[in-house]
Image (spheres, rainbow, N blue to C red):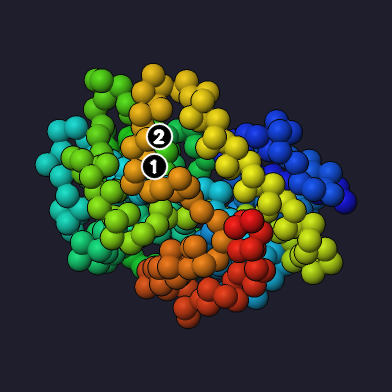
Amino acid sequence: MTLTFAARHWDHLLPLALGDVTAEGVDLHFERRDSTPNIYAEPRIDVAETSFSQYVQYRAHGDHSVTALPVFVMQGFRHRCIITRSDSPLHSLAQLRGATVGLTGWPDSGNIWTRALVRDEGVALEDIDWRVGPLTADHLTHDRIGPKRPGPHVQHLDHGETLVGGLSDKSLDAVMTPFMPPGFDAADSLLRPVLPDVRAAETEYYLRVGYVPGIHVLAARTALLDESPDTVLAVVRAIEDSKHLSILRHNKLADVTPWLVDELRTTERVFGRDWMPYGLEQNRTMISDFLTEQYEQGLLDTPADVDALFPTDIDAVVAS
């Protein structure tokens, strides 16, 4: 069977993209994208990386045309994603109470996780004035709040305004963004993370909750799953194999930075060999916490059910 799989340029998918790993019995056409594909709007895609939040909300509105599998191809901590000016007095998330904070999209999976960190500090979302808009002028201007309006404390930026511009002119106290603006890592950058020790905060978080937040999930057309589940499971197996081959190669061919091998050793001491495991039981707590946040943050009218969202059993496939 010939299938089209679309995903972004994740390193752990590189062996699959290069053909070093194949899906048994499947002629898999792998399209690597610069932005997240939208399987709902692209009918020729069979399997794709998909926004976790988008998937849950489509299901909540009765659209079962797509079914997710518990394969989180994008995972990441969010503490590093809250930035401010280098001269800002902000050094903790609790200080965001009463602040004006920008973010790149209200219903976005990553920003749901980031707002959860603020709620963990006892700051209610209503205690912050939110401004939603593009990070820089290079990003598209569109509706970034969605149809379920959260309330008057959440507003779009005015046309032509950007989040980075808001930090520069001090109309914003902080910004939540999944990816840093150009020049953020430069020695003379005027921006910095709000938290003074991001790694320490993220390590404490992981040791407390036991997972790295999942942001994008693998999804397949439900008709394909119903008609040929083994074909989709072969793709899952290939993605798992690609990830492990990527891990193996890092320890031999790591040249991203001169210190990457040492970073890999440090990572393995904290997280074990695989910091982004696939499978429902491996991710059940993380999924449940995310669904709770979607409901508590007003994005769902009723809590979603973990097992209903992930009805396909892949645990034996990824464990083999």
Residue designated by label 1: 268
- Left-right relation of 226 to 275: right
Residue 88 is situated, as x and y percent measured from the top left of the image, at 15, 38
What residue does disc 2 label? Answer: 264
Q: Is residue 124 or residue 221 the one in the foreground?
A: 221
Please state the horizontal and vertical placement of residue 227, each as a whole percent of the image.
Answer: 84, 67
| Residue 95 appears in the rendering | yes
Spatial CA span between label 2 and label 1: 6 Å
Is residue 183 in view? no
Q: Residue at x 76, y 46 (%)?
A: 23
Q: Position of residue 228 (x, y in %)?
A: 82, 63
Label 1, secondary structure: give it: helix
Q: Nearer the viewer, residue 92 or 61?
A: 92
Is residue 120 rendered to the left or right of residue 211? left
Q: Residue 10: which quarter of the image?
A: top right
Q: Residue at x 29, y 56 (%)?
A: 207
Q: Residue at x 15, y 45 (%)?
A: 91
